[in-house]
Amino acid sequence: MGTYCFGIDVGGTTVKCGLFRTDGTLVEKWEIPTRKENNGDQILPDVAAAVNAKIEEKGISKDDVEGVGIGVPGPVNSKGEVDRAVNLYWGYKDVAGEMEELTGLPAKAGNDANVAALGEAWKGAAAGSSDVIMVTLGTGVGGGIIVDGKIVTGHHGAGGEIGHANVDHHETESCNCGNKGCLEQFASATGIVRMAKKELAVSAEKSVLRDVENISAKAVLDAFKENDPVAVATMKKVGEQLGGALAIISCVTDPETIVIGGGVSKAGQPLIDCIQKYYREYTFSSCKDTPIVIATLGNDAGIYGAAKMVL
Ligand SMILES: [Zn+2]
């Protein structure tokens, strides 16, 4: 095995790049801008140029590089192709194939949320676990499922799209995907705000949130930690939906560790407690004690997981 590998995480505004040793030591990380003009057709050439320049700068032989892993925001199939990635203005693209051609190195591509899950399973909160479920609670809800140390990509590259699991069959508002009742509508930062506003409208309880002009998820979570009745009622619903969804997925893949990441996870243990309460209640007996933990790699999970893909 070579000594080095690269992990790349393509985001909407910046591309995070990491040079790793194959034992998982991060040698160096840096960022380049994501150039989205002309349907984003400069993005991969920019990444390849950054990789090639780093190899030259460090005086590394290409024979000593295992490959380049790259995570992108959009569904990626097992061949490393995307049908479209709307955030990058991409239509069909053979991401892995193009990277191999541009760098002369073996390349693999994966969905960014799936790749982040692999990163946490390799060197993060679930380090050492080969069966992991990770949900990323940000503006939306991303997810990644690791079975036997490998990403579950699925036939359409939509494996692990936990955010669009239907958790409420009676929801009348639409999710960004067009369906109604997706987990993302409850457990994302936007979902938490939506739920808090609904709760404020029907609740007669006093709440600090009534005096907040633009309610944020952080405001709800801070109020929740102070036992604010409206925030508590809101997070009870969030925990119920998220814990319930994780309980169902656990019955399918039986993870060793469940990881919660994304901006919302900064709320820490109180958030875990309200998810775990319902998770334990709903999941199959064998899975009840499965630990639910906060992600530890933060924004670096993507580069770690991307690097791991080529090993
Ligand atoms: Zn949806």
Image (cartoon, rainbow, N blue to C red):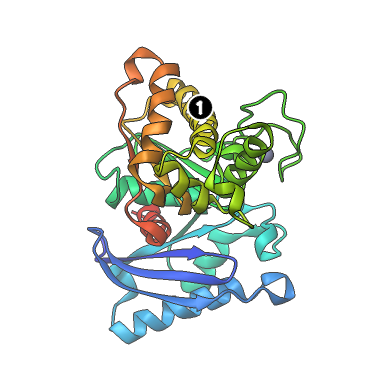
273 is higher (above) or lower (below) than 279: below
Q: In which quarter of the image is residue 88?
A: bottom right
Question: What residue is rendered at 75% in x and 39% in y?
Answer: 174
> Can you say which quadrant of the picture contains the N terminus?
bottom left
What type is the residue that disc 1 sits on?
Glu
Foreground residue, 69 or 279?
279
Foreground residue, 204 or 38?
204
Foreground residue, 248 or 210?
210
Kindly give the residue lying farthest to the top in the view shown: 285
173 is higher (above) or lower (below) than 106: above
Q: Position of residue 222 (x, y in %)?
A: 44, 49
Q: Where is residue 51 in the image (x, y as percent from the top left)?
A: 43, 76
244 is higher (above) or lower (below) than 199: above
- Quadrant position of ligand 1: top right
Q: Taking 31 as reference, is 123 left or right?
A: left
Question: What residue is rendered at 35% in x and 79% in y?
Answer: 55
Crowding at mark 1 (Cα within 10 Å: few <14, some 14-19, many 20+): many
- For the question of whether residue 261 can be seen, the reply is yes
Q: Where is residue 24 in the image (x, y as percent from the top left)?
A: 26, 59
- Classify mark 1 as within 8 Å of ligand 1 or not, answering yes or no: no
Q: Taking 20 as reference, is 137 left or right?
A: right
Q: Position of residue 216 (x, y in %)?
A: 57, 54
Foreground residue, 279 or 10?
279
**To which residue does mark 1 refer?**
240
Question: What residue is rendered at 50% in x and 65% in y?
Answer: 100
